[in-house]
Amino acid sequence: MSQVFSDPEKLKEFANALRVFWQTTEGKSWMLKSKLLQLHETWQDQQYETFKGEFEKAMEVFIRFKKTAEKEEAYLKHSAQELERYQKERLSI
């Protein structure tokens, strides 16, 4: 049997921090995208198109990260629950 060395509270704390990070970043990213699209009314040159393309690539990377982070958050919270259950069982023996 393998041994587990972890603190369930620290797992939950990190999972919550991860969620707050991606939620905050997601909101600010969409706000920035909206402003970039509005700016196109007055900024219409090749540099705008280049920047917009790079911004869209970065958004795609963020969306992939968000999906991974959501899965990891769920995994960490589940792991913390399992560790807490295991620790309670060990204490009651």
Image (spheres, grey):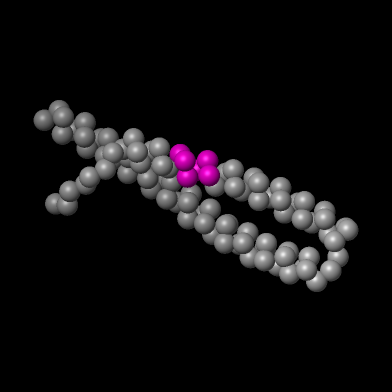
Query: Position of 86 compared to 16: left or right?
Result: left
Q: Position of residue 63 (x, y in %)?
A: 58, 57
| Magenta residue span | 16-21
Query: Position of 13 compared to 4: left or right?
Result: right
Q: Residue furthest front?
A: 47
Instruction: Give the total number of marks visible in the rendering.
Output: 0
Q: Position of residue 72 (x, y in %)?
A: 42, 50
Query: Position of 34 compared to 92: left or right?
Result: right
> Relative to 50, does residue 4 appear above or below in the rendering?
above
> At x 61% / y 48%, what residue is drawn?
26
> Relative to 35, does residue 43 appear above or below in the rendering?
below
Q: Position of residue 23 (x, y in %)?
A: 57, 44
In magenta stretch: residue 25: no
> At x 17% / y 52%, what residue is drawn?
2
Q: Residue furthest right?
A: 42
Residue 81 visible to an observer of this rendering: no
Q: Position of residue 27 (x, y in %)?
A: 64, 45
> At x 40% / y 37%, what residue is drawn?
13
Based on the displayed image, in which of its 4 quarters is residue 57 positioned? bottom right
Query: Position of 92 compared to 49: left or right?
Result: left
Q: Residue furthest left?
A: 93
Magenta segment's dominant SS is: helix
Q: Nearer the viewer, residue 46 or 17?
A: 46
Considering the image in quadrants, where does the C terminus appear? top left
Q: Nearer the viewer, residue 17 or 63?
A: 17
> Relative to 91, does residue 40 appear above or below in the rendering?
below
Residue 91 visible to an observer of this rendering: yes
Q: Residue furthest bottom?
A: 46
> At x 27% / y 35%, what residue is drawn?
84
